[in-house]
Image (spheres, coloured by chain):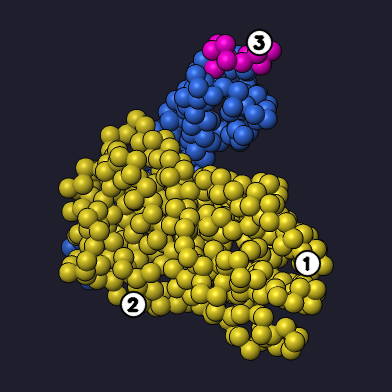
Chain colours: A blue, B yellow
Amino acid sequence: MSPLLDLLVVLLALFLVSTYLSWRAGRLDRLHARVDLARAGLDAALVRRAAVSLELAASRLLDPATSLVLATAAHQARTADHERREFAESDLSRALRAVLEQPGFREAVEGEGSALLEELETAAQKVEFARRFYNDAVATTRTARRRPLARVLPLAGRAPLPEFFEIDDVPPEVR
Amino acid sequence: MRIGIVCPYTWDVPGGVQQHIRDLAEALLALGHEVSVIAPADDDAPLEHYVVPAGRAVPVPYNGSVARLAFGFLSASRVRRWIREGGFDVLHIHEPAAPSLGLLACWAADGPIVATFHASYERSRAVTVSAPILQSALEKITGRIAVSEAARNTLVEHLGGDAVLIPNGVATEKYAAAEPLPGWGGKDAGPSLGFLGRMDEPRKGLQVLLKAFETLGRQRPDLRLLVAGPGDAGDVLARVSPGLRDRVVLLGLVSEADKIRAYHSVDVFVAPNLGGESFGIVLTEAMSSGAPILASDIEAFRRVLQDGRAGALFTTGDAESLAEEAAGLLDDAARRKELSEAARSAVRAYDWSTVARDVLHVYETVAAGAIGVVESAP
């Protein structure tokens, strides 16, 4: 083979490898963007749930003890730092179940409270949805970053490995 | 919202996925949203106003059976154009792992993409082998829905990740009213029990009901048993004592209309399933019809029937317990009426309007902060 042909083959191989690598890097980049968007959605859903919980607690529809339970849990979820966040949000889920699953709760707040209750049920459901979608994105991204090529080459740039967000978010079943 | 829904299977061929999409689309339209469905269909096929044809599907062997799928350049370019011109806030793909329009749509779109996984199966070689190919398209999905716990397990096992669970809805009003079948229902027809499902599938539990009928049929000379569903009639009748055979009426596979009439024909509808039922679709249909129900106390049924408030329960697999409970119900018209009303009210939680709202919450969750669905670079 002539030296020119050798050079051409090498150049072609380099081109193919770099195209593939940039495609892989692009895929990882897209996955990280998906994680970021899902995280923003999760944070928004959590804040919204805490806000609606506080509104219900402040609404005078509930007895003072119930209001206090709900308000405390919502406040702690809203103000928890990074370390305590998952525990505080799980506590809010449990408090919501304890309050909303009381027999006859729906009738008790009927009328004035109906819209607020519906908003709260929606907010609680969306927390579960957003958390699952976020963890789904995290799982996919972590799998992609564990592949041999992504370990050896800095395909993901300096993006940190995303962390799962694990909470008890079983929504209340209001009767 | 502007919602684009992708159906992988030929639109005018009856099937569970197609029916699901039709019911969902109509429920979303009723809630005031804009919906466009793209599905494999001939250009001259009569279609609902919200359906866009993507060309004809071809039968190909796939994953052990012959499936009618749409793929190739024509379908791909139609999907691309539909996405470009649709201006959707969210794209909802059904069965995205099938090599059909759903997969094409995954390739052609960027933005909030929701996918519903319907199928559940044991780990299959084909899916595992193709998983890396699928992976890069499926990575784009931002919100996954599974229609049953079994479907969610299948999905997690094959593709990893997570999904939310939103069961199929029931078009409850379709079942609400119907004439009983000729010779059934009404005052002079005599008491009756009903069963619906595959006769030769042991998990559906027909054998338990037949055993109970041996007792009940002897005690009550006018009691009849109505059985609707596919299976071999000879096999079934062989298990009934000769003296009772003329009171066991087998309809075989029935049309949708006759199925609804069957629910309205019997005094007690029996669901003797032994398990494996992730979601009692037959049960929710019977509840929508207002049939008084007697069901085995498997977890899924217990949940749907609210621990016995919306339908009586008996010990799973126990013919004696079934016979005892059925006798109680047959003798108590007031209790049957009560159960019928409770069933109709409990089933509202499974109505398509409720399910569509849950799906809408998924759309809102994934669309938050996104700018909508755009065509991806080819």
- Relative to B211, does residue A151 appear above or below in the rendering? above
**Which residue occupies 52% across, 45% down?**
B348
Q: Is residue B309 left or right of residue B366?
A: right
Q: Which residue is mark 1?
A: B323
- Relative to B270, does residue A25 appear above or below in the rendering? above
Q: Which mark is residue B59?
A: 2
Picture quarter with the N terminus of chain B: top left
Residue B348 visible (yes or no) = yes
Secondary structure of residue under mark 3:
helix
Mark 3 vs mark 1: tell me if same chain. Answer: no
The crowding category of the residue bearing disc 1, from other C-alpha atoms within 10 Å (few below 14, some 14 to 19, many at least 20), is many
Task: Classify residue B326 by image quadrant.
Answer: bottom right
Residue A54 visible (yes or no) = no
Task: Classify residue A94 by image quadrant.
Answer: top right
Q: Which residue is mark 3?
A: A64
Q: Alpha carbon of mark 3 to alpha carbon of mark 1: how far? A: 51 Å
Q: Nearer the viewer, mark 2 or mark 1?
A: 1
Residue B349, image x, y percentages: 53, 44
The reply to whether discs 2 and 1 touch (Cβ–Cβ < 8 Å) is: no
Q: Is residue A64 magenta?
A: yes
Report in which chain the residue with disc 2 lies: B
Q: Give the residue type that dot 3 points to.
A: Pro
The reply to whether discs 3 and 2 touch (Cβ–Cβ < 8 Å) is: no
Q: Residue furthest right?
A: B320
